[in-house]
Amino acid sequence: MSDATIDFVRRELLAQADAPAAPTPGYWQSVRQRLARDPVTIAVSLVLLAIVVISLGAPLVTHYDPYAGSVLARLKPIGTPGHWLGTDETGRDLWTRLCYGGRLSLLAGILPVTISLLIGGFLGILAGYAGGLVGTLIMRTMDVFYAFPSILLAIAICGLLGNGLSNSILALAVVFIPPMVRISETVTTQARQLDFVEAARASGTTTLQVIRYHVLANVLGPILVYATSLISVSIILSAGLSFLGLGVTPPRAEWGLMLNSLRQAIYVQPYVAALPGLMIFMTSMCFNLMSDGVRSAMDVKLNK
Amino acid sequence: MLVFAARRILQAIPILLGVSLVVFGLVHIVPGNPIDMLMPPEASPEVIAQMKAAFGFDKPLYMQYLLWLLRALHGDFGLSVFNASPVWGQLVIALGNTFILAILAAMLGFSLGIACGLTAALYHGRWPDKLFSAISTTGVSLPHYWCAIVLVMFCAVLHDWLPAQGMGDDSLPLYDRLQYLVLPVVTLSLIPMGVIGRLVRATVLEIIGMEFVGALTAKGLTRWPVIRHIGKNAAPPVLALMGLQFGYLLGGSILVETVFNWPGSGNLLNLAIFRRDIPVLQATILVLASFFVVLNLLVDIAQAAIDPRIRR
């Protein structure tokens, strides 16, 4: 080998060592890239965004009062001038009611999942990490609640506490805590047995730091994905409670309640009567598809 | 196998006790005595005391619980506070009606779900797979009470094909009474169909990728015997989910029963809530939840019978 070649190789190697390492895409970056290539997930996210924006900005997209009805304008069909989605049984503009209704429906659907995520996630990680007596105690208590079909438990709690938005949120949160605990416990138990967690503990890292830096980083993803998949169920159930007369109280606008009060009108204005249910269906479908998309984007094994 | 079954049955007992505690406790987290809420405000204290004694609400809580549990074990749930008729009698009739719906819906939903899931997995990535994925996602996102209303609208209001609600008179001929079953059964079968279909597809896809399937095909087995082998391996998880889903059909049909005015246990529960009829409420929830526990028990045992690995 000539000196020139050796020099060339040496310079090459030095250049490589000096140059900043080629950016290897991090995990979250690759998740984002996969999501950006998934047209279905993008489309449903946009629809959801539209539903949220229209609900929050309801006064801007309609000039009617959601509570002001008119005896003369009762049960108008879809396409009536001035009421493009028709009117309900007391003559209130249905588009207005649907926009305002989204606020409570989304709130009553998302808040229970958030509450159960916080409480159930905490209990589950505690049970999974601590194990032993604490773990057994938590898990056996959850088994008891698992013995109830979810809707039955929600209806029982709501029916006994009395109707109202806060009771329906509370009831659904109680219903979602056990599955949340179970998922968190499973993933935490798995994470605790990983070699680097073992190593961190062996090298004297405090329990709190192990949980914060090593366990949480590995369990939060799956727990959050599970929580998003619960939102769709939660929206259907919370609207169902209102539909039974156990959730939001009239005259407030909420999709489930509207569906119930328009139920008698299916003989007069069938299409108008089906609209609030269509909104529940669309919202829960979008949440389902979005959570499917996020799940498969986050699944490393699927995307090899 | 027997040891496994015995152990599983023993494990179910504390859960059943826990369930009874929760059902009893739920009623008593609400402040106030059930009788106070029902009696008119002008009722004299003596009458109220008498009523409390008659329904057993005058004893301390733990005695009430023990007495209630002991009687419940004998099938005695006391009298309805609303119409003073035995709770058990009402409950049996209502449960029977719910059972009819649940069994038929389960048979329809499970068979459709298995057929769709299997087809989707066998044609993985091709159009039957995509079509089915769309159907099953729709199935799990449908608010079934809305679906019930849309079906009534379409089949009973816009077209006069099927009756809109109720379960028909005893005097009607069988064929006419069967018509009342169609809409509720179809509505209830949608969710199990979607859920089972998704699981069957995922499980079968996982098994198809295993080496033994390739070996069977290489050995010269034709399509259907191979599918039979796959089916036997896919059965345990699917069976477990079927048990859960059947439990949901029994306990969760309240919304659909309300729409169709079907006199089942869900309807009874709904009425009991609005009449604040505590004995009926407690009994219905306790019996439905116990069914759920027993059902899960049976599923576990059946799973172990199919797959010896589960017995450990």
Image (cartoon, coloured by chain):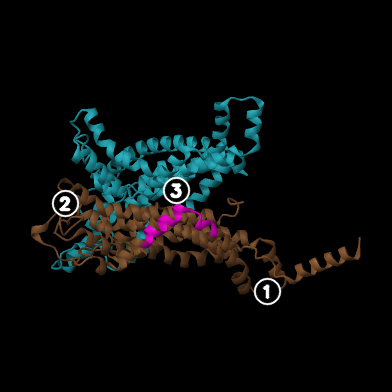
Discs 2 and 3 carry the same chain letter: no
- The label shown at residue A205 is 1
Chain A's colour? brown
Q: Amino acid at mark 1?
A: Thr
| Residue B19 locus on image (x, y percent) | 42, 55
B215 to the left or right of B147: right
Subunit bearing disc 3? B
Q: Residue at x 51, y 46 (%)?
A: B9
A27 to the left or right of B271: right
Please state which of residues A46 and A229 is positioned toward the viewer in this rendering. Answer: A46
Q: Majority secondary structure of the magenta segment?
A: helix
Residue A130 can be seen, yes or no: no
Q: Residue at x 34, y 53 (%)?
A: A282
| Residue A242 locus on image (x, y percent) | 27, 58
The residue indicated by pointer 3 is B293
Q: Which chain is cyan?
A: B
Residue B254 can be seen, yes or no: yes
Mark 2–mark 3 distance (CA, rounded to whole Å)? 48 Å
Query: Relative to residue B3, is residue A97 depicted above or below?
Result: below
Query: Relative to residue A285, is residue B136 depicted above or below?
Result: above
